[in-house]
Image (tube, rainbow, N blue to C red):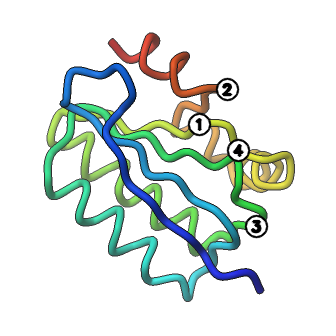
Amino acid sequence: MSALSISVAPVPGGDGAGCVIRLAGEADISTTSLRDALAAEVAAGPRLLLVEMSALTFIDSGATQMIITAYRALREQGGTLALVSPSTMVARVLGLLGVDQVIRVYGSIPEAVTSTR
């Protein structure tokens, strides 16, 4: 299994009210760093939280549940969580689990920023 790499940065060209969590590698139920990173960013109360997934090669139902939990918590605070550029395999899992019916999925960060304004 390829370890999960997580980086966080402000939304490019944003107004400072959002951030991008970039995921690379594999995320599963045992990847507590994903849950911790999402919880920390939600606690900061961004208006927009983008989870960029182009370099994520695997995700399971446990990791998707972590993302859904963050989505719900942020929505309760009036914020928005969206997924960006999932790889083909990850997009397939998101579709099979119905995550893409709950959380908006965008093809790029600029598209997500424009659509969520």
**Disc 1 target residue:** 84
Quarter of the figure with residue 90: bottom right
Quarter of the figure with residue 28: bottom right
Q: Position of residue 80 (x, y in %)?
A: 32, 34
Task: Compute the Cα span from label 3 to label 2.
Answer: 18 Å
User: Where, quadrant-wise, is the C terminus in this rendering?
Assistant: top left
Dot 4 surroundings within 10 Å: few (below 14), some, or many (20 or more)? many
User: Where, quadrant-wise, is the N terminus in this rendering?
Assistant: bottom right
Of residues 12 and 26, the one drawn nearer to the viewer in this rendering: 12
SS assignment at label 2: loop
Tag shown at residue 86: 4
Q: Position of residue 104 (x, y in %)?
A: 54, 31
When the figure is inspected, residue 10 is found, relative to residue 22, above or below; the finding is above
SS assignment at label 1: strand
Amino acid at the residue labelled 2: Gly
Q: Is tag 3's residue or tag 2's residue first in the polypeptide sequence?
A: 3
Tag shown at residue 19: none
Task: Compute the Cα span from label 2 to label 4.
Answer: 8 Å
Tag shown at residue 58: 3
Disc 1 and disc 2 in contact, CB within 8 angstroms: yes
Disc 4 and disc 3 in contact, CB within 8 angstroms: no
When the figure is inspected, residue 115 is found, relative to residue 106, above or below; the finding is above
SS assignment at label 4: loop
Residue at point 44%, 83% (across, down) = 32
Disc 4 and disc 1 in contact, CB within 8 angstroms: yes
SS assignment at label 3: strand
Quarter of the figure with residue 116: top left
Disc 2 and disc 4 in contact, CB within 8 angstroms: no
**Disc 2 target residue:** 107
Task: Compute the Cα span from label 1 to label 3.
Answer: 15 Å
Task: Compute the Cα span from label 4 to label 1.
Answer: 6 Å
Q: Is tag 1's residue or tag 2's residue first in the polypeptide sequence?
A: 1
